Image (cartoon, rainbow, N blue to C red):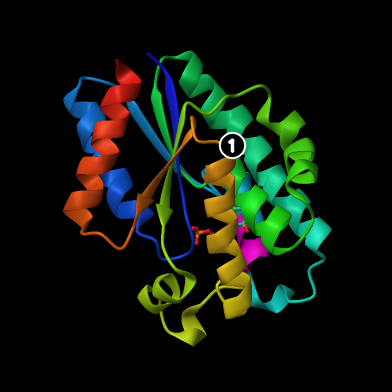
Amino acid sequence: MALLITLEGPDGCGKSTQIGFLKEYFEGQGKKVLLAREPGGTSISEKIREILLDNDNSEMDYRAELFLYAAARAQLVGEVIKPALEAGTVVIMDRFVDSSAVYQGMARGLGVDTVYKVNEIGLDSVKIDLTILLDLPAEEGLKRKKSQHEMDRMEKESLDFHKKVAEGYRELAARNPERIYKVDATKSVEEIRELILDRVKELMK
Ligand code: TMP
């Protein structure tokens, strides 16, 4: 059975660790698993990622930013995600369209509906089965991140911006309780793993 599972959350929320556990779980079930991160995951999308996260691009217009994330996503969907789903693969994404909804739609203020509309063509009717939100206060996430000079263009945004991101995710989860499963990311790695696996097992029933 093909599945599309996305992991979302503020910077530093611990997605990568949990994605590793999910991969292990599905492979243990004999499933073929594909992991991809956004922005990125294809040669073209990784080049767009460089433009997006480059600290020299501080003058980037918010709308241009929205379209670049959407372009990177369209390439990933067409080249990787769609073919994988058609082949019955479990696709696990480190960020997907909800990141644009929250970062560009809410924190940048472009509007969630606008963001989903812009992304519609690129998503090519791909549907997310389950989204795991690792909910973490902005301050906590930033503390877990690298030092200031190693931070990329998005991570360097103000604390106020990152607070809007954390709050935006909670709002999005409240609006989509069926699809988005919110987990308290201040819990231990093991506790989070158990909560996520319980929800995934429910989905597989
Ligand atoms: P990463 O650090 O998780 O790899 O993500 C790169 C940064 O890009 C992160 O700060 C979140 C941001 N981002 C958006 O603003 N919009 C998007 O659509 C995506 C996928 C990421």
Q: Nearer the viewer, residue 30 or 43?
A: 30
The residue carrying pointer 1 sits among few (fewer than 14), some (14 to 19) or many (20 or more) residues within 10 Å by Cα, namely: many
- Ligand 1, image quadrant it occupies: bottom right
Q: Is residue 185 above or below residue 23?
A: below
Q: Provide residue 97's location: percent of width, then percent of height.
A: 61, 42
Q: Name which residue lies at 41% across and 15% down.
A: 88
Query: Is there any visible trace of residue 154 in the rendered image?
Result: no
Magenta residues, start to end: 49-53
Looking at the picture, how far across and down is residue 122, in whole percent? 71, 33
Q: Position of residue 107 (x, y in %)?
A: 68, 63
Q: Is residue 142 magenta?
A: no
| Quadrant in which the C terminus is drawn | top left
In the picture, measured across the screen, residue 13 lies left or right of residue 86, that is left
Q: State whether residue 115 is above or below residue 74.
A: below
Predominant SS along the magenta part: helix
Residue at left offset 72%, top offset 44%: 71
Q: Which residue is mark 1?
A: 76
Foreground pick, 94 / 41: 94
Could you say which quadrant of the image residue 47 lies in?
Answer: bottom right
Screen quadrant of the N terminus: top left
Is residue 178 at least partly visible in the picture?
yes
Residue drawn at (47%, 22%), measured in percent from left and top? 84
Picture mark count: 1
Label 1 element class: helix
Is residue 52 part of the magenta span, yes or no? Answer: yes
Residue at figure coordinates x 21%, y 32% from the top left? 25
User: Is label 1's Cβ within 8 Å of ligand 1?
Assistant: no
| Image spot of residue 145 (x, y percent) | 40, 74
**Left or right: residue 59 compared with residue 151:** right
As displayed, is residue 9 above or below residue 118? below
Amino acid type indicated by mark 1: Leu
